Structure formats: structure tokens, C-alpha cells
Image (cartoon, rainbow, N blue to C red):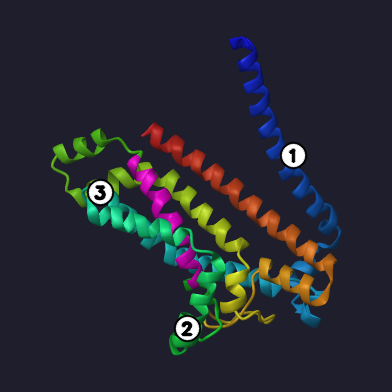
Amino acid sequence: MSVQVKEKLAACFVWGAALLTVGALVIIIGYIMFQGLDRISISFLLENPRRMGSEGGIFSPLLGTIYFTLVTMLLAIPIGVGAAIYLTEFTAEGLLVRVIRFFTDALAGIPSIVIGLFGFAFFVVMLRPLTGGWSILSASLTAFCMILPIMIRVSEEALHAIPASIREGSLALGVSKWDTVLHVVLPGALPGILTAALLGIGRVIGETAPLLLTLGGSLLVPKSIFSPSRTLSMHLYLVAMETGEFSVAFATAAVLVMVILLLNLGGYYLMKHLGRRIRGA
């Protein structure tokens, strides 16, 4: 077989794999939108669910999704980025770093339902006076355990991508280590850190199993982070399984898909904007 034929076969395989991936995405999104868009309206977005979610809208699950995601990311971003900075900038490669990375990778491989069971036993039952039991805070702490490895490893790779010469130039000018990290390294790594945040948001928005054990599933509008609630993914699962009202479930799924697409598009635009500013600087 000639080299030209091998190259053409490889190109066909790569293009076929890409088209298959894109085609599967288009089919899934298209089917969900076809089934759910006709049910979506202003009233559907602004009304609370009724009759176990089979009637009414998705206002309280939508608010629950926003609150839950915000609390989770407020916990995960500072700690995840801080851990990545420590591993990348303030420690040398050694046994301690290898142990931390090993346990980080091990935590990432634990099934979400197992983390949900831990969250129920620890945050809901043992820490009930502090978390309120089934609540947004308990669910956020559980989700924090799930996405922390993503935040650490992706942020760590973003920091590693900054050339060592930039750090050395800053230190040679007499700038302290912390100021170099804060004003030189972190701005250059912001697009990668934003990618880590988007991956974390996508993970927590789509989770269902751990939230069934920690969030409570209330249809009421949450009054605080100590209130039980439900997310959009949790709502569509419960509506489909408990009421059999698949039209509401598909409409909820369509809203969830649009939220995720908007987040990804916004993050992509922000990453490009930050990249242009960094290159211009």
C-alpha cells in the first residue's frame, strides 16, 4: 500500500470520526429541541411547578440551578486555583506533590453516586445543624468534592503553559514570588482557568444522582442556601420518572441545553477576548 493511499485512508478516518461526533451532537440536540421547544414560553419560565412538576413551569428549579451552581463555583474556584498555584509555583517536584496528584486523580475517578452517598451521610446527616440538612449548601459541598479535581488539574496545566522565562524575568526585576504569580502568571493563565471553571459548571449542572441524596427536591422557591431545592436536570428526571409527563421533561431539557450552550458560547468569547488582551499586552 502506497504512502498516498495510507494518507487518504487516515484522512477519511479522521473526517469520518469528526462527522460522526458532530452528527451525534446535532441529532441529540435537534431531537430534544423538536420535542421541547413548543412547550417553552414566558409563563413556563416564570411559573412555579405544580402537581409534582407535571403542570406549571420551571421557575423554582431554574433559580435552584443558579443558586446551586454559584455556591459550588464560589467554593471550587478559589480552592482549586489556590491548590494549583501551590503545586505549580511554591513546591518542587517530589513525593508530596506526587501524593497530592495521585489522590486528586483518585477523587476524580470516584463515581458520582458514591460521592453523593458520602454527601448525604456527612453533610446532610452529620452536619445538619450547620448545613440545614437537605439544602443547596449540602448539595454544593458534595458537588465541590466532584469538581475539585477538574479545577486543580486543568488550572495546573494552564499555569504550566506559562513559560518559565516570564517568571524569571519578573523575579530578576526584584518582584516578589507572590507578586509574580499574582500579576504575571495568573493573568496569562486566565483562559485556561476559565476553561476549568466552564468544565466544572458543565459537570455540576448536568449531575442528578448526588443531588437526589443531598438537595432535597423541593418545588418551592429557595429562600437561602440552607433551603432544599432542585436543579433543572433533577427536575426533568423526577418529572419523567414520577409523573410520566414527558412533554414537561423535554421542555426542561431544552432549556437546560440552551443554558449550557449559552454558557459555552459566552466562555468561548471571553477566552478569545482574554487571549487577545494578553497577546496585545
For marks 3 and 1, give the CA distance. Answer: 42 Å
Answer whether residue 151 is magenta in the image.
yes
Disc 2 on helix, strand or loop?
helix
Answer whether residue 173 is magenta in the image.
no
Q: Which x, y percent locates residue 152? A: 39, 55
Q: Residue at x 62, y 61 (%)?
A: 206
For marks 2 and 3, give the CA distance. Answer: 34 Å
Is 216 rendered above or below residue 200?
Answer: below
* Front residue of this view, candidates 168 and 246: 246
- The quarter of the image holding the C terminus is top left
Question: Which three-letter amino acid code belongs to the residue tagged 2?
Answer: Thr
Dominant secondary-structure state across the stretch colored magenta: helix
For marks 2 and 1, give the CA distance. Answer: 44 Å
Which contiguous range is marked in magenta?
142-160
Left/right placement of residue 6 relative to residue 130 reads right
Front of the two marks 2 and 1:
1
- The quarter of the image holding the N terminus is top right
Q: Residue at x 46, y 59 (%)?
A: 108
How packed is label 2: few (under 14 Cα within 10 Å), some, or many (20 or more)?
A: many
How packed is label 3: few (under 14 Cα within 10 Å), some, or many (20 or more)?
A: some
Is 231 rendered above or below residue 171?
Answer: below
Left/right placement of residue 179 relative to residue 201 reads left
**Residue named by callout 3:** 89
Is 17 rendered above or below residue 31?
Answer: above
Of the image marks 3 and 1, the number of the one nearer the N terminus: 1
Q: Which x, y percent locates residue 271? A: 49, 42
Q: In which quarter of the image is residue 95?
A: bottom left
**Residue named by callout 1:** 23
**Residue named by callout 2:** 131
